[in-house]
Amino acid sequence: MNEFSLRKKIRDGLEQLPESNHNIFRRMYSPENMMANIYDVVDRMSEDKLSWALFQVERSIDLRKENKMTLEDKIKEWVPIAEKLKETKKIEMALRVEICEEMINGTAGKPLTTKAKAVVNIGNMKVDANSKTSLKIDQEIYDDIEEELSPEALQCIKNTKSVIKSKIENLADDDDLFDAVYEVPATPTLSVKYLDE
């Protein structure tokens, strides 16, 4: 089989395989550029690797058809999917935080703000952003002031030295306990509902 036919058969075979197989193929034949177009990878391969690459592609197709993938095959298929998902999740989370911050416009993060919400209609979408915070205790400051705290303030603290929000909201604004309390923002949530559904 000539070089042109080998490359064509590899490209045709890759079309029958999922992205996870493409990533394995890239890792083997284009490790320096894992984002390369899979067909460009085939076009740039040296001629001496084509026969072996075609064998691997055809074997992958056969294994999928016969559902005879070994545990090792399944793990090798899973790894690039998991890596891609992790990277996608990181990008999604950063964008979600940015969108929620812009929608909520700084309402979260104020002292004792435990929940902030914003809902907007954009085009045919109803977008719902939620940001929550939890209250934590600075242990060093708390240890210094614990003996001076009122019984009401002490009732706001759980055994694990976390804060009971419903109780601390009833304390006077100048209560000493607030010196030891700080906010920890949670990852915001974002949901979209299409209005024409």
Image (spheres, rainbow, N blue to C red):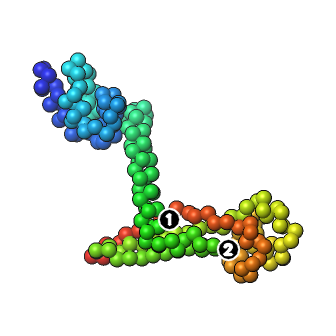
> 135 left or right of 84?
right
The residue carrying pointer 1 sits among few (fewer than 14), some (14 to 19) or many (20 or more) residues within 10 Å by Cα, namely: many
Residue 124, percent from left and from top: 28, 74
Q: Residue at x 41, y 56 (%)?
A: 92
In this orientation, does residue 65 appear? no
For residue 165, which numbered disc appears in the image?
Answer: 2
Relative depth, front residue between 172 and 155: 172
Task: Classify residue 139 by image quadrant.
Answer: bottom right
Tell me the SS state at disc 1: loop
Closer to us: 176 or 151: 176
Q: Quarter of the image holding residue 58?
A: top left
In the image, is residue 117 above or below residue 161?
Answer: below
| Quarter of the picture holding the N terminus | top left
Residue at figure coordinates x 35%, y 30% from the top left: 31
Task: Identify the amino acid type marked 1.
Answer: Pro
Q: In this figure, which residue is indicated by the disc labeled 1?
A: 188
Quarter of the image where one finds residue 179: bottom right
Q: Residue at x 78, y 58 (%)?
A: 140
Disc 2 residue type (three-letter): Lys
- Residue projecting furthest to the top: 48
**Residue 151 visible at all:** yes
Q: At numbered mark 2, what does the secondary structure look like: helix, strand or loop?
A: helix
